[in-house]
Amino acid sequence: MLGYTNFEEDNMRDYFYQIKGKDSSEYANSPWAWPPLFCGKVSAQDKKEAKLIIEEEYCRKFPLRVLRKDLEQNHYLLNIREIAENDQRTRDLFNSNECQQCGKKFRRIDLYNDHNESYKGSEYCSQECKQTYLELNRVVELDVTGNGKPVIYRIRNIKTDMSYVGKTTQVFTLRWYQHFYQGGACKFHQAIKDSNLDEWEFRILEIVDISDAACRGQLIADRERFWIKTLDTIECGYNSAFV
């Protein structure tokens, strides 16, 4: 009996399946909608067994082929194919990935099956996390002559991962110097005094585009508040309060 069981396990194959629903739109090229209602994977000895496993899971029969004359009687269509050994693209859909923004574990197949989620990649668990990551890690070009636009900057302690967010209309390197060599008594400057210079990194978060000179000061302050709130640098950082 043990040998028979091992034989069965050795002959198990992975099958990728799609359950499609009808497309009732006026300009549809096919009676079956895209994307599928659900995609998944089962392990079976052959395609026939894979179909039985899927039907048992969903408690219903699925046709593999529907003639045009039978469309009225069939609301779903099942596609099944064996996943080839070299089909890494399909196999990767079921691998566990870690979101670069929030660290959450996710599978791409779950993103494909979530029709409310527009992001389908392998780096982030959602479009929201992708946008947040790109916003927080945006690389910008700077005018270091002193004639550039106001900037919002972030100074982060690489050991504690705590940050300070500030704004400046000066050359940003000058503001860096002022924090580290002309510091005051706030908790940020106290943290600087209690650490080494090489424990800190300086990054520009945003160049503030001023289209209305009359609102210049307010706009700069608003963007600073946005980043303080986004990075939570009052509760979890070195900012003392909103300005």
Image (cartoon, rainbow, N blue to C red):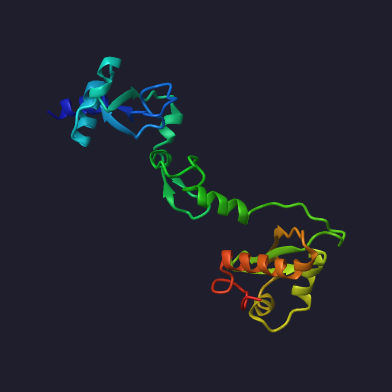
Seen from the viewer's position, the closer of residues 78 and 173 is: 78
Relative vertical location of residue 92 with respect to residue 50 in this rendering, above or below: below
- The image quarter containing residue 170 is bottom right
- The image quarter containing residue 211 is bottom right
**Given the current orientation, which residue lies at the most extreme bottom position?**
185
Q: Is residue 100 visible?
A: no
Question: Relative to residue 70, is residue 205 drawn left or right?
Answer: right
Q: Is residue 243 visible?
A: yes
Relative vertical location of residue 177 with respect to residue 116 in this rendering, above or below: below
Residue 33 x/y as whole percent: 38, 29
Residue 215 x/y as whole percent: 75, 67
- The image quarter containing residue 154 is bottom right
Question: Relative to residue 220, is residue 52 drawn left or right?
Answer: left
What's the residue at 42%, 24% (across, down)? 28
What's the residue at 61%, 68% (across, down)? 228
Residue 100 x/y as whole percent: 53, 50
**Given the current orientation, which residue lies at the most extreme left position?**
1
Seen from the viewer's position, the closer of residues 30 and 106 is: 30
What's the residue at 78%, 78% (across, down)? 182
